[in-house]
Image: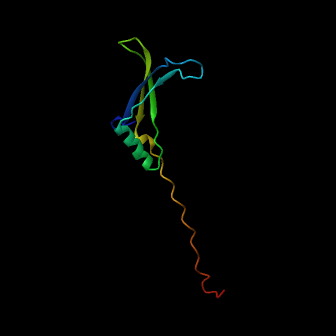
């Protein structure tokens, strides 16, 4: 079961693209302003040599003020979710028999 106390969350919204002129333009746009806590948690995980994994969640919403449809999104990062398994220890070298040490060649 995930430990929600250790989760670092970043929330943002994306809206229909008002400037979409053709099919090559994105349907929705938005921006994310990352806070220091989120970035610091990602950097600390990357420093350990394990790439951070960020989960994404999305909800369809309607603005109470304007009636505009948008998607509310959340990025969630839990350090325990991304810890990789430790590397296996190398096999020990085979023991060298010393019973042949008496031979001169």
Residue at point 39%, 36% (across, down): 2
- Nearest the camera: 39 or 2? 39
Q: Is residue 18 above or below residue 88?
A: above
Q: Which quadrant holds residue 10?
A: top left
Residue at point 49%, 17% (across, down): 18
Q: Is residue 76 above or below residue 93?
A: above
Residue at point 39%, 34% (across, down): 34
Most distant residue in the right direction: 105
Q: Position of residue 99 (x, y in %)?
A: 59, 81
Q: Is residue 95 above or below residue 87?
A: below
Q: Position of residue 22 (x, y in %)?
A: 59, 18
Q: How many marks?
A: 0
Most distant residue in the bottom direction: 104
Q: How is the image coloured?
A: rainbow
Residue at point 58%, 74% (across, down): 96
Q: Position of residue 3 (x, y in %)?
A: 36, 37
Q: Position of residue 9 (x, y in %)?
A: 37, 33
């Amino acid at each position: 079961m995930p430990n929600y106390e250790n989760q670092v969350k970043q929330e943002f919204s994306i809206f229909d693209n008002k400037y979409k002129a053709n099919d090559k333009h994105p349907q929705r746009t938005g921006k994310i302003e990352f806070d220091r806590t989120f970035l610091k948690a990602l950097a600390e995980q990357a420093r350990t040599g394990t790439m951070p994994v960020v989960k994404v969640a999305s909800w369809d919403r309607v603005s109470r003020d304007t009636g505009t449809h948008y998607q509310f999104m959340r990025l969630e990062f839990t350090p325990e979710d991304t810890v990789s398994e430790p590397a296996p220890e190398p096999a020990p070298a085979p023991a060298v028999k010393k019973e042949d040490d008496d031979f001169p060649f």
